[in-house]
Image (cartoon, helix red, strand yellow):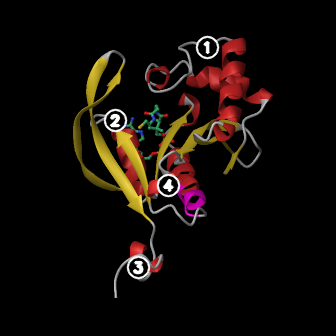
Amino acid sequence: MTLRAFCEPDVAMVQDLATDPYIPLIGSLPADADPAAALAWIGRQHARLAEDVGFSFCIADEEDRPLGFAGLWTRGLPGGRATAGYAVRPSARGRGVATHALRALTDFGWTFPDLHRIELYIEPDNIGSRRTAEQAGYRHEGLLRQHQEIGGRRRDMCLYARLREVADGPLRARGRVGR
Ligand SMILES: CC(C)(COP(=O)(O)OP(=O)(O)OC[C@H]1O[C@@H](n2cnc3c(N)ncnc32)[C@H](O)[C@@H]1OP(=O)(O)O)[C@@H](O)C(=O)NCCC(=O)NCCS
């Protein structure tokens, strides 16, 4: 499995993502997107880096067939933080795609020396996403009550996070604290 840039032939997969009732609620992909809307969404993913929003990757299998989406959002990088998000096309679910993609995305995150913490915000009843987070080494840190509006309703979110693993602790390794 690889994480790569989106390209035009991924339109059908993006349309597939748009059939999921939840995915259009948590991003800019319109529900039941037609090919033009899916292509426009791909164009917006390409703009994320230039806009300093972060990295939007297509998850692809060994034969480069697109399976989903994984994003690392880096606006918090000056504070040492990033957030991640992911979605897998319905036909590819339940065989470890999200788990592998989140592990790869996390490894990619640690290539930024200033990144110390990657956060995930997951609804309590999204068991598939919570299991994905746990399988990728993220720890549940607590419940953020009415944290954000999704689909016109304030929703509680579980906060998951992974920290950079360094032998001597994250801040000391950067030479900022400690004796
Ligand atoms: C959540 C999602 C990304 C999971 O993708 P996936 O490729 O099927 O996940 P994996 O196959 O890697 O499964 C990871 C774990 O979750 C479990 N799981 C997956 N879907 C599940 C479900 N619907 N209910 C319960 N457990 C589920 C798997 O069994 C596995 O756990 P295990 O290793 O203990 O058996 C996918 O369902 C999806 O795209 N959902 C819509 C978008 C979304 O919710 N994104 C996350 C927003 S926070």
Q: Identify residue type, mark 3.
A: Arg
Range of residues picked out in magenta: 106-110
Q: In terms of image quadrants, where is residue 37?
A: top right
Q: Residues within 10 Å of mark 1 (few under 14, many from 20)?
A: many
Residue located beneath label 4 in the image: 78
Q: Earlier in the sequence, mark 4 or mark 3?
A: 4
Residue indicated by mark 2? 126
Pinpoint residue 6: horizontal percent, then vertical percent.
72, 35
Which quarter of the rendered image does ligand 1 occupy? top left
Of the two numbered discs 3 and 1 in the rendering, the one whose residue sits closer to the viewer = 3
Q: For mark 4, does the 10 Å Cα neighbourhood hold few (<14), some (14 to 19), or many (20 or more) residues?
A: few
Residue holding disc 3: 172
In the image, what residue type sits under mark 2? Answer: Asn
Q: Are marks 3 and 2 in contact (CB under 8 Å)?
A: no
Helix, strand or loop at label 1? It is loop
Camera-nearest label, 1 or 4:
4
